[in-house]
């Protein structure tokens, strides 16, 4: 099979990305080949900038271009409320709602003894230090509603009991626009046990 | 919404690629952020090389790193047979079969008067020159079996009648592993009219 080496290399590199198979990688590579030079350069610059221009906020471990991220620096945000999430993508998901105006704390994962992810591998110590340095009234746990997320929430709740902060967890129940008929039993069960009085 | 600017730019650039939406672009960008620097650099290099290291073969318009592509240069290939295809991706698809040992000629598209693609926009003139310079016995038309591909095949057949070359078209019929029950009427019709004696 005689594919020009640079094309084959681009296909191989692109197919290393998640959800991109060999066929899609080939389509992307041939698309880039046909695109004009400026478009390809701005893509390359943007990808390089990801590694070169971004770091993690020293306060909340969100992405940042400076030592402190835009959210931690913003005077408009309520820094007495801290939402604890697993990953940076969760911050993005919550920011998109425009419903939350507090600060964040990115753990960088969840507890998982099988994968050897113990509390010291997550940014839990830094969270405790933030609470100890004062000014925080409420911690909202917004970890994924799965076994590891629940275990991590439970662990954090136990630790945080020693500190004068309110600890809450985001609600579980039927998703908006969801269909009760097609919801799984665990979700319906949680929706019942978490019902609120009207 | 407070997403760090370099991340937002990478998401925007990645989502310009075909079949990549905003959600996938965000996933890819966050994946690249987490990848180590070497992996990101080799991706960036591979994409840049696509534009910098590749050109089109001056004989067949296939991709090449030099003036002539590997297929045109190869002494093992039969240069008396030329397969005419629409795009470079068709060359790759045919090469993957390991069934064809001749040369290629990439037209760079198909005739489409509505999109203002006239014969002079395709590499038809160059094909004629190749035939005129001698050494070619057979032209195999391997254009896509659609209206534009058929129109282009018809156009080429008429032009090539004036030259002492055999002109053939790749067969149409049921695809291997296909199911007669689910094949469309046009394909079944072609399979009948193109039946071969056993």
Image: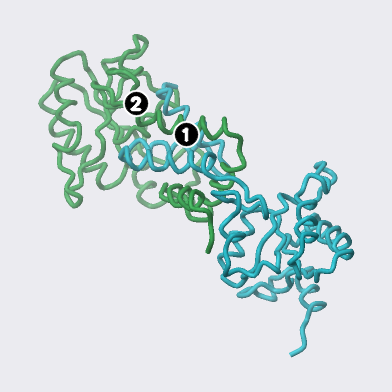
Chain colours: A green, B cyan
Residue toward you, B140 or B36: B140
Q: Which residue reaches farthest top?
A: A75
Residue at 26% in and 24% down: A60
Per the image, label 1 sits on a secondary structure element best described as helix
Residue at 79% in and 77% down: B194
- Counting from the top left corner in percent of width and height, residue A118 is at 15, 42
For the residue carrying disc 1, how many other residues have a C-alpha within 10 Å: few (<14), some (14-19), or many (20+)? many
Indicate left or right for A59 with B35 as reference. Answer: left
- Counting from the top left corner in percent of width and height, residue A9 is at 45, 50
Residue at 15% in and 38% down: A119
The residue that mark 2 highlights is: A54
- Counting from the top left corner in percent of width and height, residue B6 is at 42, 25
Residue at 58% in and 43% down: A33
Q: Which residue reaches farthest left?
A: A162
Query: How many numbered discs sit on the rendered protein?
Result: 2
**Pointer 2 indicates a residue of which chain?**
A
**Rendered view: A129 above or below A157:** above
The residue that mark 1 highlights is: A44
Per the image, label 2 sits on a secondary structure element best described as loop
Quarter of the picture containing the C terminus of chain B is bottom right
The quarter of the picture where residue A157 lies is top left
Q: Which residue reaches farthest bottom?
A: B198
The quarter of the picture where residue A82 lies is top left
- Counting from the top left corner in percent of width and height, residue A23 is at 53, 55
User: CB under 8 Å between callouts 1 and 2?
Assistant: no
**Rendered view: B187 above or below A28:** below
Quarter of the picture containing the N terminus of chain B is top left
């Amino acid at each position: 099979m005689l594919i020009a080496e640079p094309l084959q290399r681009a296909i191989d590199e692109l197919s290393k990305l998640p959800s991109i198979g060999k066929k899609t990688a080939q389509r992307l590579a041939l698309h880039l080949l046909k695109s004009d030079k400026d478009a390809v350069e701005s893509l390359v610059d943007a990808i390089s900038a990801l590694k070169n221009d971004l770091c993690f906020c020293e306060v909340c471990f969100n992405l940042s271009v400076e030592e402190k991220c835009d959210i931690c620096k913003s005077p408009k945000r309520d820094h007495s409320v801290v939402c604890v999430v697993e990953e940076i993508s969760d911050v993005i998901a919550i920011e998109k709602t425009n419903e939350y105006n507090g600060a964040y704390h990115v753990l960088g994962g969840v507890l998982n003894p099988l994968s050897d992810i113990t509390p010291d591998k997550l940014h839990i110590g830094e969270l405790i230090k933030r609470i100890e340095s004062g000014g925080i009234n409420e911690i909202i746990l917004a970890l994924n509603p799965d076994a590891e997320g629940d275990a991590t929430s439970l662990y954090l709740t136990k630790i945080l009991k020693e500190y004068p902060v309110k600890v809450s967890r985001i609600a579980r129940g039927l998703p908006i626009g969801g269909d009760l008929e097609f919801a799984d039993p665990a979700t319906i069960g949680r929706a019942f046990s978490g019902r609120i009085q009207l």
